Amino acid sequence: MGINSAMYNGVSGLNSFSAAISVVGDNVANSNTTAYKTNKVHFGDMVNQYLSINSNDTESEGAGSMILGISTDYAQGLILNTSNWADLAIGGEGFFNVQDPISGKMYYTRDGSFHLDDQAYLVNMLGHRVQAIGGSGDIQVPNIQNFVSFHVETDGSIYGVDNTGAQQFINQVALFSFSNKDGLVRQGNNVYIAGPEVGQVFDNATLPEIFGKVLDYSLENSNVDLAKQMVDMIIFQASYNANSKTITTCKDMIDATINMVR
C-alpha cells in the first residue's frame, strides 16, 4: 500500500465518521420529538485491488471505510400523560394510519398527537386524517354538538359521552404493522411511508391480537438514549481525529521523501 492509498483511506474514514456524527446529532436533536425512533449507522470496509500472496489465493488490499446503511430502532419509547383525550399512544406493536386529504397519500406514524378539526375529523398536526379500522375511511365525529366528552378504549374504539352520561360508539382507530419495519421510509414530520421492502402488512381488523394497547391522554416519547448517544459521539470524534492523523502522517512522509532528494 502506497502513501497516497493510505491518505485516501484516511479521507474515506473522515467521510464515514462525519456521516456517523451527523446521525448522532440528528438523534440528539430529536431526543424530545414525539415517537421519534433512534437511527444507527452501519460501517463497511472497501476493497481497492487484490494482492498476490504465496498461495493459490489472493488477498485484497483495503481501501478504507464507507457507510453501508442506516437502520432504525423501533423500540418502545416512554409513555407520557397529557390532558387531551385525542392524544393517543400505542403501548406495544403498531402504527397509526393517516391520510393527506389533499393528495390522498397514506402515511404511518407512532405520533398520536391528534385533535378534532373544524369538520370534526380526527387529524394530526399536519391535518392528515386518522383512518378507521378495516379501510372504512376517515374518522369523523357525527353530531359533535351532542357530546360533552370522549374517551378511547385500549382496542382503539372511540366513544362520545353526552350530557346524560350515555356513551355512543363513534369509530375504531386502525393499526398497522409490517413483517419488515426496516422497509418503512422516513418522510420527516414524524411520519413514514411503506417502501417496497416492508413485506407483509398486518392490521388490527384481521390480527388484533398482535397489536399493543391504544392509550388515550398519552403520547409516546422519543426512544433516544442520550447517554449512549454522547458515548457514540465521543467514539466517532476520536475515530475522526485518528483518520485526520493518518492524513497528516502521510503528508509528513511525503514531505520527508521530497526533502531527501533536494
Image: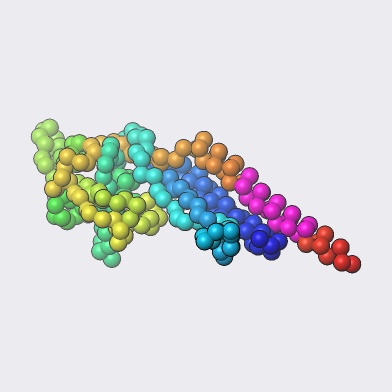
Residue 27 image position (x, y, % from top left) = 48, 46
The residue lying toward the viewer, choosing from 41 and 169, is: 41
Q: Is residue 83 above or below residue 49?
A: above
Asked if residue 179 is positioned above or below residue 104 in the image, the reply reads above
| Magenta segment main secondary structure | helix
- Asked which quadrant contains residue 147, the reply is top left
User: Is 252 contained in the magenta span?
Assistant: yes
Identify which residue, 224 or 107, lies in the foreground.
224
- Give the residue displayed 29% in from the left and 51% down from the top: 180
* Image location of residue 21, percent across then percent down: 56, 49
Q: Is residue 202 left or right of residue 38?
A: left
Q: Which residue is at a point 57% across and 65% down the rendered structure image?
A: 49
Q: Which residues are magenta?
A: 238-253
Q: Quadrant of residue 154?
A: top left
Is residue 235 among what the camera can see?
A: yes
Q: Nearer the viewer, residue 131 or 192?
A: 192
Instruction: State yes or no: residue 216 in magenta.
Output: no
